[in-house]
């Protein structure tokens, strides 16, 4: 088997302590600013945009049943009655409506929160996600045989993708846990169980478009069998809850997220966003030719890694999964930058193993916010779109760097 080069000795950080102190000071300022903004009531209506759809879906389930969740008219009616109770005692009307694209089985998660008012439920959801991610990070790293300090864990955890998840009220923590358990199970030799955990990622099935083909390429049937079992279980539960019509409506709603229902395509971190941007300076066919070539190259490289560089144990497999996800985020049609939250536990593990350079952690912390600040100062109206393209570039860099590292590992047999 091949090993990955240890990069811990390749970079000296005599200012490590000062960097940690600077990070703590910046975190304190960020928390103080966040608290002041929240107390002032500014941006109150934007908090929990996606959570509003989840909460409304759970309300609909309690009053009208699971099948009604996927009616746009019903969603709009329920969401219109979910204003935030802002800290200044005023009610801020919701400015954005969202749909519920997930299978009925995943809606069950939010049913207990409907016994709280909307604002309190959102605040509880944010705290659960913060605490849940930290606890899971520490658990997963320990289960993988490493020890992570609280400081190191928080530095990887408190990043722009996580903050975006919390502001929107997204439920990507479910994906983090399912992916982490998949990796852990594979590394300890429980391959069927690993595949079973992978089925939980059907919450956002586009995250699986390269992972599953990678397993097929390796003819790794046990994880695929486990995935099939959990997928059938989730679909069966969803059918029992919502019936065939409700299940069909949920699939149709998910499909609409690839169409005009979602207007944020230009701000995504994928080749679709690049094509939409290039349409402003190239013929439409030329813009999409560039994007399609990029998709084919990224997907092809990721699948090539599964064919040639599959490492069943150790950090090599984790790096392979990181490369696959980076390619997935670049290729898939629906890819917001908050999906990068899935990489947090994997990058922390690779950092502790010395597989990735120490500078990665500081770029992960400071790179995205500084990039957005510079883009906003340059052109506020285009900052979101250009930021998405910047995140696409980061995904492609992670993919290329990981491929090179795995290639080097094959030359060092033990």
Image (cartoon, grey):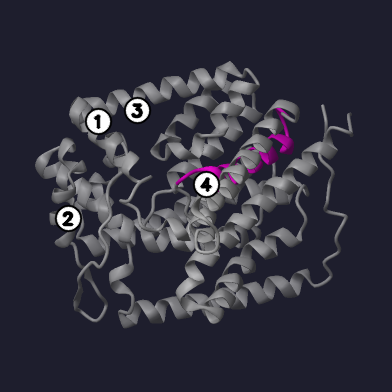
Query: Residue 186, which numbered label?
Result: none
Q: Secondary structure at mark 4?
A: helix
Q: Which residue is mark 2?
A: 76
Q: Are marks 4 and 1 in contact (CB under 8 Å)?
A: no
Q: Mark 2 or mark 1: which comes first in sequence?
A: 2
Q: Secondary structure at mark 2?
A: helix
Can see residue 373? yes
Q: Are marks 2 and 3 in contact (CB under 8 Å)?
A: no
Instruction: Give the distance between the C-alpha atoms of the residues marked 4 and 1, in whole angstroms.
Output: 34 Å
Q: Which residue is mark 4?
A: 136
**Residue 244, percent from left and from top:** 21, 25
Q: Which residues are magenta?
A: 311-333
Q: Dot 2, how many residues are within 10 Å of its Cα: few (below 14), some (14-19), or many (20+)?
A: some
Q: Which residue is mark 1?
A: 248
Would you place residue 181 above or below residue 290 in this image? above
Instruction: Give the distance between the C-alpha atoms of the residues marked 1 and 3, in whole angstroms.
Output: 14 Å
Would you place residue 166 above or below residue 25 in this image? above
Q: Mark 1 or mark 3: which comes first in sequence?
A: 3
């Amino acid at each position: 088997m091949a090993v990955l080069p240890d990069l811990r000795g390749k970079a000296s950080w005599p200012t490590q302590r000062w960097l940690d102190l600077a990070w703590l000071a910046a975190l304190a300022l960020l928390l103080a600013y966040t608290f002041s903004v929240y107390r002032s009531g500014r941006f109150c209506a934007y908090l929990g945009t996606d959570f509003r759809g989840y909460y409304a879906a759970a309300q609909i389930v309690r009053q009208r049943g699971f099948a009604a969740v996927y009616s746009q008219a019903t969603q709009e009616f329920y969401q219109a009655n979910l204003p935030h109770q802002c800290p200044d005692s005023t009610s801020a009307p919701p400015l954005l409506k969202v749909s519920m694209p997930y299978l009925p089985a995943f809606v069950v998660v939010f049913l207990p929160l409907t016994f709280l008012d909307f604002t309190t439920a959102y605040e509880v959801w944010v705290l659960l996600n913060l605490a849940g991610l930290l606890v899971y990070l520490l658990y997963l790293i320990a289960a993988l045989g490493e020890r992570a300090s609280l400081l190191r864990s928080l530095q990887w955890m408190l990043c722009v993708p996580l903050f975006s998840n919390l502001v929107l009220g997204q439920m990507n923590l479910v994906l983090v846990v399912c992916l982490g358990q998949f990796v852990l199970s594979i590394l300890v030799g429980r391959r069927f169980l690993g595949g079973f955990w992978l089925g939980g990622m059907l919450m956002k099935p586009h995250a699986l478009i390269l992972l599953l083909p990678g397993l097929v390429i390796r003819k790794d049937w046990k994880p695929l069998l486990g995935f099939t079992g959990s997928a059938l279980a989730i679909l069966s539960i969803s059918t029992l809850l919502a019936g065939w019509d409700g299940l069909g409506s949920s699939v149709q709603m998910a499909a609409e997220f690839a169409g005009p229902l979602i207007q944020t395509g230009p701000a995504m971190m994928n080749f679709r966003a690049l094509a939409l941007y290039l349409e402003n300076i190239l013929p439409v066919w030329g813009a999409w030719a560039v994007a399609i070539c990029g998709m084919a190259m990224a997907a092809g490289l990721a699948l090539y890694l599964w064919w040639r560089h599959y490492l069943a144990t150790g950090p090599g497999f984790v790096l392979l999964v990181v490369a696959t996800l980076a390619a997935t985020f670049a290729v898939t049609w629906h890819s917001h930058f908050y999906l990068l939250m899935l990489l947090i536990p994997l990058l922390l593990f690779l950092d502790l193993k010395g597989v990735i350079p120490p500078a990665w952690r500081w770029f992960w912390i400071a790179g995205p916010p500084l990039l957005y600040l510079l883009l906003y100062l340059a052109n506020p109206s285009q900052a979101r779109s250009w930021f998405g393209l910047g995140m696409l570039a980061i995904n492609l860099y992670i993919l290329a760097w990981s491929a090179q590292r795995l290639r080097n590992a094959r030359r060092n047999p033990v």
